[in-house]
Amino acid sequence: MGTVRVILTKEVKGLGGAGEVKSVRGGYARNFLLPRGLAVLATPENLRKYEEMKKTQQRKAQRLREAAEATAARLSEMTVEVSLLVGEGGKAFGSVKASDILERLAEAGIDLEKGALHLENPIKALGEYTVEVRLGPDFTVPLKVRVVPKE
């Protein structure tokens, strides 16, 4: 069977990433890649479908990027205020968790996923803090958080 051209549908270690067109031995394609759904034959029709799918994914990624940039602009201008119960001598009772900050953001009309906030440890003292917000892969923005005493 010689070599055949395939379009990888998933990443294959040592061969390439999803969407790449590769020439592989016929037996490797027939016995391994094709039965496991890791590749499809690079026929003119499959190449055309892949190009259309790639363009659709690029448009979707661009829309998501634009939405993330708009959210980033809003986040960089705002300061989230969270209240914390404080006793005598300024000792804080409890802590501010990522879920508390997400609640305040939701009240302001910004809905983020739970894992979007990078808060290593809960905040246990009054003051101003900067929290990293992940809006996408390789796209983070700092958010100011002010912890004030609960009245």
Image (cartoon, helix red, strand yellow):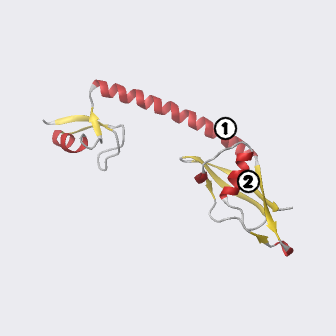
How far, Cα to Cα, is label 2 from label 1? 17 Å
- Tell whether 137 sits left or right of 21: right
Q: Which mark is residue 108?
A: none
* Residue 126: quarter of image: bottom right
Please tell me which residue is depicted at 64% across the width and 65% down the height of the picture. 121
* Residue 89: quarter of image: bottom right
Q: Please tell me whether residue 34 is drawn above or below residue 95 in the rendered image.
A: above
Spot occupied by residue 125 in the image (x, y as percentages of width and height): 76, 67
The residue singled out by tag 2 in the image is 144
Q: Residues within 10 Å of mark 2 (few under 14, many from 20)?
A: some
Please tell me which residue is depicted at 29% across the width and 41% down the height of the picture. 37
Spot occupied by residue 116 in the image (x, y as percentages of width and height): 60, 51
Q: Please tell me whether residue 142 is drawn above or below residue 2 in the rendered image.
A: below
Q: Residues within 10 Å of mark 1 (few under 14, many from 20)?
A: few
- Tell whether 146 sits left or right of 120: right
Please tell me which residue is depicted at 58% across the width and 38% down the height of the picture. 65
Q: Please tell me whether residue 22 is drawn above or below residue 86 in the rendered image.
A: above
The residue singled out by tag 1 in the image is 70
